[in-house]
Amino acid sequence: MKKILKVGFDLDGVILYNPIRFVRPIAKLLKPLKSFILKQKEEFFYYPESNVEQFLFRLLHKTSFMADPALKDIELLVKSKKIKAYIITGRYSFLKKDYKVWLKKINADSIFEKCYQNKDDLQPNEFKEKMIKKLNLDIYIEDNLDIVQKLNHHTNAKIFWITNILDKYISYQYKFRNLKEALQNLPKSK
Ligand SMILES: [Mg+2]
């Protein structure tokens, strides 16, 4: 029997085109500075605690302002039974409303097998790891290099990385410029 590939997709920066994808390398540079100033323990991912921080975080997520045109390609792959597609987003629980709006906008029900949000506010990489294992995914497509590296260490799935203008010189086996290119490089199902 033909095996249908199980492919997971990150939301922000993968399904949703995010022009500020390159914020990651900048945020990474600033992180030790922030921990130093605030005398905080350095956490792997920042969690916005106060209302003001959550407001800013929400605003930041508004920058995922359109669906990537290659969403059509995912739909075709699903309809022709080449893949089963899942959305797995690290978005925290307080972003639920905006998340639901996006799912509607992109008509997620008709394309994706199922969509999962990080509603228990785990560290995003831990949530993704948990879901990749649970769903036994063959491939997961992610835009954040820190998460890509963590997932590589902790799961058996192939982690595809969608790069950005500041990170694009970093070498990585499954590095792609955009979603379309990543989809074109999916292994052929046997
Ligand atoms: Mg992302």
Image: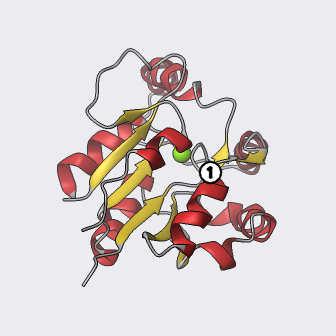
Q: Identity of the amino acid at label 1?
A: Glu
**Residue beneath the point at 45% across and 27% down:** 35
> Label 1: which residue?
49
Q: Is residue 153 left or right of residue 140?
A: left
Question: Can residue 41 be seen from the camera position used here?
Answer: no
Query: Is 7 in front, or is 10?
Result: 7
Coloring scheme used? secondary structure
Q: Position of residue 85 (x, y in %)?
A: 49, 69
Question: Residue at 63% across / 49% down in the picture?
Answer: 70
Give the percent coordinates (x, y) of residue 46: 51, 42
* Nearer to me, 142 or 154: 142
Q: Which of the 4 image quadrants contains residue 4?
A: bottom left
**Quadrant housing the N terminus:** bottom left
Q: Which image quadrant shows ligand 1? A: top right
Find residue 130 and report its image quarter.
Answer: bottom left
Answer few, some or many: residues within 10 Å of disc 1's Cα (few below 14, many 20 plus, some between 14 and 19): few
Residue at x 72% of width, y 44% of height: 64
Of residues 2 and 47, the one nearer the viewer is 2
Residue visible at 30% across and 54% down in the picture: 187
Give the quarter of the image for residue 188: bottom left
Quick one: which residue is furthest to the bottom in this view? Answer: 1
Using the image, determine if residue 89 lies above or below residue 6: above
Percent from the top left, x then y, of residue 178? 54, 36
Q: Is residue 131 above or below residue 178?
A: below
* Secondary structure of the residue carrying numbered label 1: loop
Residue 33 coordinates in the image, percent (x, y): 47, 17
**In this rendering, position of residue 133 left or right of residue 78:** left
Quadrant into which the C terminus falls: bottom left
